[in-house]
């Protein structure tokens, strides 16, 4: 009878382990298909060629390192939280890299529009002016214009190649240039003068955005300082008087309290950033 019970228990544990492994495997497959493929596509559009499998391994490595750091410095509760956050950090990094790339592209676009305007006045075509830009300007603008020129040479229509470039970059300024260029090619117009006007408009927007960032920088800094004070104070108390912090860091009530503080801090930082985020 005892042997049957033990066999039944082992069988139940085995079936439970198979179910858990199946759920985890399915979750990783969906995670790879939905998020990693999109992240890999974003990296490819930025000329960073990383496939979804490599991005998955990188994400798991980041999650493992953060979980290990949380366990060594704090406890298993912090390790679980940091481990879960590790699955988000790479995508946040990809987002920041893309934003910085767009900002750099838009700054280079101002000078390139002036250069293309001069090329049009010299009698060059759009393809010739774009090829000149791809050879003389630094990345990322040279990369995008170089791919645009290659698509034209392969037989893609200029309008479609321009729209493909706008979709890859994700810049509103470039979309404005593409739309104006396509309309001008269909209806006719002075493209050199049009590019001068667009360049001046973008430059003025940069000036206004810089002034707004200067005026709102104090509010953003206050939000980060006030938001980081409870966490910083908790770390200092945990270093100076671990006996006082131990009951909170080793009980479910303390876990709930820490989670509530982190949630309220995140909400506060998000609201402050939304208040000072002024779009032009």
Image: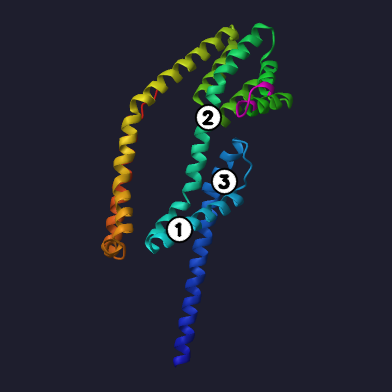
Residue reaching furthest to the front: 240
Q: Earlier in the sequence, mark 3 or mark 2?
A: 3
Can you tell which of label 3 and label 2 is closer to the viewer?
A: 2
Q: Nearer the viewer, mark 1 or mark 3?
A: 1
Q: Which mark is residue 37?
A: 3
Give the number of the mark in front: 2 or 1: 1
Provide the residue designation for mark 1: 69
Q: Closer to the N terminus: mark 1 or mark 3?
A: 3
Per the rendering, the mark at residue 198 is: none
Span highlighted in magenta in the image: 135-142
Disc 3 to disc 2, C-alpha distance: 21 Å
Quarter location, residue 136:
top right
Q: Position of residue 108 (x, y in %)?
A: 56, 22
Q: Quadrant of residue 38?
A: top right
Secondary structure beneath disc 3?
helix
Q: Is residue 141 magenta?
A: yes
Find disc 2 in the rendering and name its residue. 102
Q: CA distance from mark 1 to mark 3?
A: 28 Å
């Amino acid at each position: 009878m005892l042997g049957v019970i033990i066999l039944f228990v082992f069988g139940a544990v085995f079936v439970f382990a198979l179910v858990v492994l199946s759920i985890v495997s399915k979750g990783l497959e969906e995670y790879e298909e939905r998020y990693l493929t999109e992240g890999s596509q974003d990296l490819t559009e930025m000329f960073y060629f990383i496939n979804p499998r490599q991005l998955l391994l990188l994400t798991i490595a980041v999650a493992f390192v953060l979980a290990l750091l949380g366990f060594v410095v704090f406890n298993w509760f912090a390790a679980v939280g940091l481990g879960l956050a590790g699955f988000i950090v790479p995508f946040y990094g990809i987002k920041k890299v893309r934003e910085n790339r767009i900002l750099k592209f838009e700054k280079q676009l101002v000078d390139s529009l002036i250069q293309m305007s001069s090329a049009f006045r010299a009698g060059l075509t759009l393809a010739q002016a774009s090829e000149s830009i791809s050879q003389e300007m630094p990345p990322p603008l040279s990369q995008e214009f170089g791919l645009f020129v290659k698509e034209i040479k392969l037989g893609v229509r200029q309008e479609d190649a321009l729209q493909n470039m706008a979709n890859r970059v994700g810049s509103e300024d470039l979309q404005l240039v593409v739309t104006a260029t396509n309309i001008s090619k269909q209806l006719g117009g002075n493209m050199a003068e049009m590019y001068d006007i667009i360049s001046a408009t973008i430059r003025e927007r940069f000036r206004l955005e810089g002034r707004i960032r200067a005026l709102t920088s104090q509010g953003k800094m206050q939000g980060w300082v006030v938001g980081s004070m409870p966490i910083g104070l908790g770390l200092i108390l945990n270093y100076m008087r671990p006996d006082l912090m131990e009951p909170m860091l080793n009980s479910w009530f303390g876990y709930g309290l820490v989670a509530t503080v982190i949630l309220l801090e995140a909400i506060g930082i998000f609201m402050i950033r939304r208040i000072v985020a002024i779009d032009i």
